[in-house]
Image: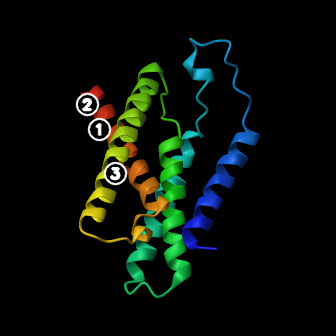
Amino acid sequence: MEKTTLLTVFILAIILIIMIFTKKIDFSDNLNIKNKLKLLPFWLKFPGIAIALFSIIAHWTDIHGKNEIIQLFWQLGLTVGLLFISLSKERTEDEMIMQLRLNSAFFVLIVGIIVHVFIVLIDKLIGANDFQSYSSIYLINFLLLAYIFFFYSLKRKLRK
C-alpha cells in the first residue's frame, strides 16, 4: 500500500476508536452545547506540543529525506500532536470558548477548501499531473495548523 493510504487508514482507525469509546451524544437537548462536544483533557495539550515539536525536529535532522521511517513519523507525529493541541480543553472552557472553536473550525474549513482547490487548479494550469505532492496528510496538517492559529488569535483578541 502507498504511504498516504496507510496514513489515511491509520487516522480513520484512530477516529473510529475515539468514536467507539466516547459516550453517546444525546441530541434531545439541542440547546446545551457542552454536552455535544467532547474534548480531550487540558493536560494533553502539552504532550501534543512535545510530539509536534519532536516530529518537526526529526524531519529537520533528516535533511536528505532518505530515511522513510523518519518521513512517516514526522508526518504522522505532527498530525497526532496537532490533533492533541486542537482537541484539548482550555483551562476555563465556557460558552464563549466553544463559540470561538466553532467560528475557527468553520473559517478553517472554508479556507482549506479554497486553498486546496486553488493549488490543484494551479497545478493543472502549469501542466503537472503529480497529485502525490498534495497528499491528504498535508491538507490535514494545514487545516489543523490554521485552526490552532485562528482559534488562539481570536482568543487573544477576546482577552484584550
Mark 2 belongs to which amino acid? Lys
Structural distance between the alpha carbons of marks 1 and 2:
6 Å
Residue 137 vertical placement versus 89 (above, below)? below
Structural distance between the alpha carbons of marks 1 and 3:
25 Å
Structural distance between the alpha carbons of marks 3 and 2:
30 Å
Q: Which mark is residue 153?
A: 1
Task: Check disc 2 and report the residue beneath it.
Answer: 157
Whole-percent x, y for residue 22 in the image:
72, 36
Whole-percent x, y for residue 118 in the image:
29, 52
Which residue corresponds to the image point at 54% horizontal and 73% vertical from the top-left? 72
Task: Check disc 3 and report the residue beneath it.
Answer: 117
Apparent side of residue 54 relative to residue 31 in the rendered image (left or right)? left
Residue 127 vertical placement versus 142 (above, below)? below
Which residue corresponds to the image point at 39% horizontal and 72% vertical from the top-left? 130
Quadrant in which residue 6 is drawn: bottom right
Q: Which comes before the other along the chain, label 3 or label 2?
A: 3
Q: Quadrant of the N terminus?
A: bottom right
Residue contact at pointers 1 and 3, CB within 8 angstroms: no
Which residue corresponds to the image point at 43% horizontal and 61% vertical from the top-left? 138
Mark 1 belongs to which amino acid? Ser
Residue 132 vertical placement versus 147 (above, below)? below
Apparent side of residue 91 relative to residue 156 in the rendered image (left or right)? right
Mark 3 belongs to which amino acid? Val
How many residues crowd mark 3 within 10 Å: few (<14), some (14–19), many (20+)?
Answer: few
Whole-percent x, y for residue 88 in the image:
53, 41
Whole-percent x, y for residue 9 in the image:
64, 60
- At numbered mark 3, what does the secondary structure look like: helix, strand or loop? helix
- At numbered mark 1, what does the secondary structure look like: helix, strand or loop? helix
Residue contact at pointers 1 and 2, CB within 8 angstroms: yes
Q: Which comes before the other along the chain, label 1 or label 3?
A: 3
